[in-house]
């Protein structure tokens, strides 16, 4: 997986989406339709979250398999340190690799509500998880056999593709960071461990992203840093995001969402804010954009259309 910086107006700006596993069997069909609609737009990858402590591990793998088998898009699996032993994490990585998953997002993660930091398990940092993913793949045979169509029993031997490993970056600082430079230092450690690109935590102003990238580059970070952007379409969603990330309240967006009385109007406000953010970070040199889809295709595709990255959606 590779990213190249492109100015807005270039033939293609890379983009990707994040999904989460269905919470029930009844929502599985709707998610499959969302996957198809997002895949049709041509993203670089579709990432699938992984529940804390493995709560949705099986369903995550089911979604990843569906993406791999029913679309031409790269599936990317989230992995967390939380609640995992070395042996358990290695077993899970092998399971993903056996399913043909070759892209990962390695996260430290947070303990579930009510659990202490001791719940983290053997893996203490995302950098250690990056190293483990590399180690597990290195233990596998370096070549794979691919059947030759029309020639039963014949195979073609080729080198295995190396895994792609994304990590998280925090433009406004991680809530647990002890000092301002700690987040860049952590990103440097992840890069040294073998990370191939980074995806940022949410931010609300383009300067937050550009200033962080500038600090990271000055410190020696060379991997691509994708901006993570979420359309905020309701006051409740904004409150939840602020609770999870520790970000400062974006007063202009908060006021606009509070004043607007209709869900449709709030959705338009969130789309406009996210589209403007996409345009600004791409114009400032971002190598692409990563959008949090909330398992719905229409909003994020509309954001990309209004940002000029995709054609306008047909209604």
Image (cartoon, rainbow, N blue to C red):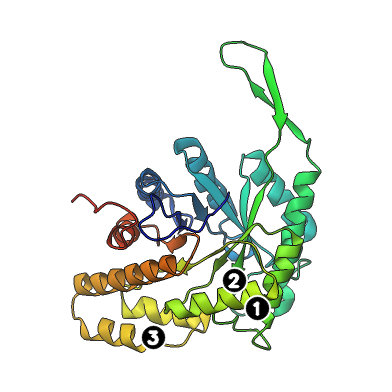
Residue depicted at x 63% and y 74%:
216
Q: Secondary structure at mark 1?
A: helix
Q: Position of residue 1 (x, y in %)?
A: 58, 49
Find the residue positioned furthest to the top: 151
54 and 303: which is toward the camera: 303
**Which mark is on residue 307?**
none
**Mark 3 or mark 1: which comes first in sequence?**
1
Above or below, 252 relative to 144: below
Q: Position of residue 43 (x, y in %)?
A: 44, 49
44 and 48: which is toward the camera: 44
Apparent side of residue 87 relative to residue 225 in the rendered image (left or right): right
**Which mark is on residue 183?**
1
Cα distance, mark 2 to mark 3? 20 Å
**Which mark is on residue 250?**
3
The residue at which mark 2 appears reads as: 169
Q: Secondary structure at mark 3?
A: loop
Name which quarter of the figure residue 132 lies in. bottom right
Residue depicted at x 54% and y 82%:
172
Cα distance, mark 3 to mark 1? 22 Å
Cα distance, mark 2 to mark 1? 7 Å
- In this orientation, does residue 110 appear? no
């Amino acid at each position: 997986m590779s990213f190249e910086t492109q100015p807005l107006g270039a033939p293609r700006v890379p983009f990707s989406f994040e999904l989460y596993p269905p919470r029930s069997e009844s929502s599985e069909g709707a998610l499959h339709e969302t996957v198809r609609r997002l895949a049709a737009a041509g993203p670089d990858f579709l990432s699938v979250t992984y529940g804390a402590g493995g709560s949705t591990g099986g369903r995550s793998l089911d979604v990843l398999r569906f993406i791999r088998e029913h679309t031409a898009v790269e599936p990317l699996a989230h992995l967390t340190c939380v609640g995992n032993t070395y042996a358990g994490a290695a077993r899970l990585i092998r399971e993903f690799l056996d399913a043909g998953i070759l892209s990962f997002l390695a996260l430290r993660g947070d303990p579930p509500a009510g659990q202490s930091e001791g719940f983290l398990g053997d893996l203490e940092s995302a950098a250690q998880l990056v190293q483990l993913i590399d180690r597990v793949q290195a233990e596998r045979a370096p070549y794979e056999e691919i059947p030759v169509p029309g020639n039963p029993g014949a195979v073609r031997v080729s080198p295995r593709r190396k895994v792609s490993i994304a990590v998280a970056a925090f433009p406004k600082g991680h809530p647990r960071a002890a000092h301002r430079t700690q987040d860049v230092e952590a990103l440097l450690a992840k890069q040294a461990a073998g990370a191939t690109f980074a995806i940022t935590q949410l931010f609300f102003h383009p300067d937050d992203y550009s200033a962080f990238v500038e600090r990271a580059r000055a410190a020696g970070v060379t991997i691509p840093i994708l901006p993570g952007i979420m359309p905020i379409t309701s006051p409740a969603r904004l409150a939840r995001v602020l609770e999870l990330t520790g970000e400062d309240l974006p007063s202009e967006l908060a006021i606009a969402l509070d004043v607007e009385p209709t869900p449709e109007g709030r959705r338009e406000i969130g789309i406009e804010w996210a589209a403007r953010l996409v345009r600004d970070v791409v114009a400032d040199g971002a190598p692409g954009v990563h959008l949090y889809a909330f398992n719905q295709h229409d909003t994020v595709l509309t954001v990309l259309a209004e940002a000029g990255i995709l054609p306008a959606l047909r209604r």
